[in-house]
Image (spheres, grey):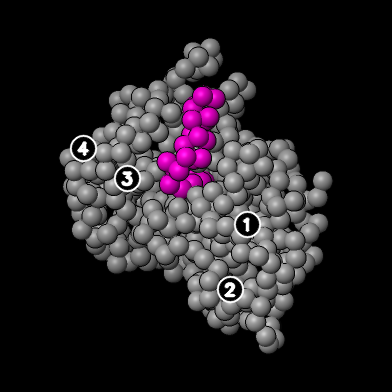
Amino acid sequence: MTAPAERSERVTLPRHGGDRPIPRTVLRGARLVGADGEHGVHDLWLADGRIEGLDLPGDAEVELDARGLVATPAFLDPHVHLRTPGQEEKEDLASGLAAAAAGGFGTVVSMANTAPVVDDPAIVADLVARAAELGLARLRPAAALSVGMRGEQLADYAALRDAGAVMITDDGIPVADAHLQRRACEYARELGLVIQTHSEDPGLRQGGVMHEGAVSHELGLPGNPAEAESVMIFRDGEIARMTGARVHIAHVSSERGMRVIEFLKAEGAPITCEVTPHHLTLTDEAWRDFDPVVKVAPPLRTAADVAYLRDAVRRGVVDCLGSDHAPHTRAEKERDALTAPFGLPNLEVVFPLLYTDLVRAGHVPLERLLDLLQDGVARVMGWAAPTLAPGAPADVVLLDLEAEASVEPARFLSKAKFSPWAGRVLTGWPVATLVAGRLAFSRTR
């Protein structure tokens, strides 16, 4: 096997902080690939934080030997938990954005379920400013749908947007009040903001810790039925259709839920949806060890659900991938199945995991995976599609599609050093990530 680190002598760019001059850089002999296909082998030039062009003359302050590597726009993630403010023992901006860059992500959207909740414009502005100083992945915060995420009163979306918020969501807490959801959609539509939903009916999911089905019955653990998801997706999609708001359905986990999304899209509802790496690669059978590492919300479903989600990815029903990176302390995840928190870390393995299980396994072509990580997220958010064309932001990830390495959680840059994929050998690892022309990650660091 060839581990990514064994290729990394060629990636020796110096780190550049957020306020330092950006060197003119050339990536020599890179194979350029995007969601729109192959673009040949070229020298890719970066200058002043932008893509300068291909095969240009002149001198570079920094040269990078990228022969044999794929250069593609850095990935986008619409759904990460960075735990700042107030939960820095789980993750902080430095560790979370470093983990994002290690996974090839140039921009991430952070969730609002922190302590305090991100429902104040001052918190949004502080997050943006602090992240910019780090010189890692770029942060675009989401803000809370309701004050305190209590589901009672709308937050001030206009002020939050003006401070830098790009999404509105009470992620982690379903909005039980349909009238509040309607008013949130109407307000967000006026401001051009995306509403992201955690679509689970609280009355149906109750205290379920895993998928309700044969395995939960056998193990004696409380189950969360797929219908809790499908019922709420239908409600949220109907409110989107009624209000005209852009509603993004997060982490769809079940065949039932995906079928409802297909129906709603056919009816013209302005909705989009994401799936996560864990819902595409793990099933409820992972619970047989009673290890809460696999406790996530919504829960891991059956093999039939995974197969249907993969087919929905292949058919283009799924708009994008969201990692739902949700770090916790190891002590928290070592509690019993009923009291351990929901969520797992995954930013650093998203690409090799899905490249291995989807692309190399023949389910989707590489370009489709890149679309889910690049253009698809941009379409959901209303951003310009990432590209390596001249003038575009110099957000680039170099990938070694031949590198094989096992998942070693102890080496994660995230503070959450555990993984349900620990020990799995995966193929196709990020070697370096540049954000605005500055090195945010390399395997030699």
Q: Is residue 300 visible?
A: no
* Discs 2, 3 touching: Cβ within 8 Å: no
Q: Residue at x 51, y 52 (%)?
A: 371
Element marked by disc 2: loop
Real-space Cα separation, disc 4 to disc 3, in angstroms: 17 Å
Give whichever of discs 2 and 4 has the lower sequence position: 4
Residue 370 percent location from the top left of the image: 55, 53
Element marked by disc 3: strand
Tell which tag, 4 or 3, sits nearer the viewer. Answer: 3
Residue under circle 2? 437
298 or 289: which is nearer to us?
Answer: 298
Instruction: State left or right for residue 67 relative to residue 353.
Output: right
Q: Residue at x 58, y 22 (%)?
A: 285
Mark 4 crowdedness (10 Å alpha carbons): few <14, some 14-19, many ≥20: few
Residue under circle 1? 102
Give whichever of discs 1 and 2 has the lower sequence position: 1
Residue under circle 4? 178
Q: Which disc, if any, is residue 271?
A: 3
Tell which tag, 2 or 4, sits nearer the viewer. Answer: 2
275 or 261: which is nearer to us?
Answer: 261
- 417 is higher (above) or lower (below) than 84: above
Query: Is residue 316 inside the magenta stretch?
Result: yes
